[in-house]
Image (cartoon, rainbow, N blue to C red):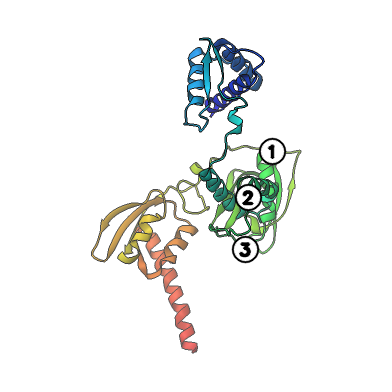
Amino acid sequence: MASNKNALIRYKTIDQCLRNTMRKWTLNDLIDACSDALYEYEGKDVYVSKRTVQLDIQMMRSDKLGYNAPIEVYQRKYYRYAEEGYSIMNIPVTENDVKVMNNAIQVLRQFKDFSLFREMDGVLQRLEDSVYSSQENNRAIIHLDKNEQLKGLQLIDPLYSAIQKKKVLEITYKSFKARQENILTVHPQLLKEFNNRWFLIVYHKTDFMNLALDRIIKIEEKDELEYIDKAVNGDEYFKNVIGVTVSNSRPKRIEFWIEKRLAPYVITKPFHHTQRLIKETEDGFIFNILVQINFELERVILGYGESIKVLKPEKLRDKISKQLGRAYNNYKSVNSDD
């Protein structure tokens, strides 16, 4: 990322030099200008070689970045733009660029009701006006699923800020199972969205906890307490689970059968990144995944109803069987009442 940023700084610097027609620019002049610019931006001496600037000029001349800059050498040693008034900052937006940016705008607009994106609305409007002259006859053709009635969305901003600023929080929380609310002193680490619900991953006392935003009653920053940063990497933290419930247990090899008609859905949208196809049977396919057994895994399995069968481990197989038995009894009791 740093090398890309430095390259952009050099391109911009070379462009500024060549736009200044009041002086003549040799290759050494451009090298010095790029070195000075990098020192100004980075605060340290950055060696810019002759070869680097030559490659920069070659890149600016090419179509790789869309510049096609008309850089020429005259009197065998000076560089300039052959077209008066040219600048890489004035590159016209192509029709394809407009389509790409407009599609991106429409996707971002799907988040307009989240407080985290609310301040972007004016930015999006200005961008939209710039890249697409009229939106009146255009409808959004990308629709993202979202739960606008979900409580706690207004907390995303302050929680995001608390994580960013490394603030300890006192959270008043009431889970679905609790009879009364609890006051927790926590160190917020990560915000996680799953299945249209938002969760706050916190470090509490000696372990991690998941707090559903819709169950948070109040938050208060505790500036007098020192924040514990566990440097949670979301990809690493959730790599062994489906959903958000992470335990200290080892992941288990889950083997399951899916009937043939639904197998394409499971193949194209795996339960988990560890999913592997084991074999094809006469009436379906057998897969396995390596995950921790949690509530979300059970919900996924139960969601496939009669089209799935857990083969291993036996403990999970029995648990799912008992839940299906209770579900059957619920329907059986309804029928008997009729």
Residue placed most toward the observer, 249 or 116: 116
Residue 307: name its quadrant: bottom left
Kind of element beneath mark 2: loop
Identify residue for label 2: 133
Nearer to us of marks 2 and 3 is 2
Q: Residue at x 55, y 50 (%)?
A: 103
> Counting residues from the N terminus, which is met first, the one under dot 1 or under dot 2?
2
What residue occupies the far left of the structure in this picture?
282
Q: Is residue 130 left or right of residue 299?
A: right
Alpha carbons under labels 3 and 1: distance apart: 30 Å
Which mark is drawn over residue 41?
none
Cα gap from disc 1 to disc 2, whole angstroms: 39 Å
Circle on res. 165? 1
Q: CA distance from mark 2 to mark 3?
A: 49 Å
State the image coordinates of residue 217 (x, y, percent, origin top left): 71, 57
Q: Earlier in the sequence, mark 2 or mark 3?
A: 2
Bin the neighbour count of mark 2 within 10 Å (Cα to Cα): few under 14, some 14-19, many 20 and up.
few
Judge depth for marks 3 and 1 and give the one in front: 1
Which residue was labeled with disc 3?
176
Tell me, yes or no, if residue 317 can be seen here.
Answer: yes
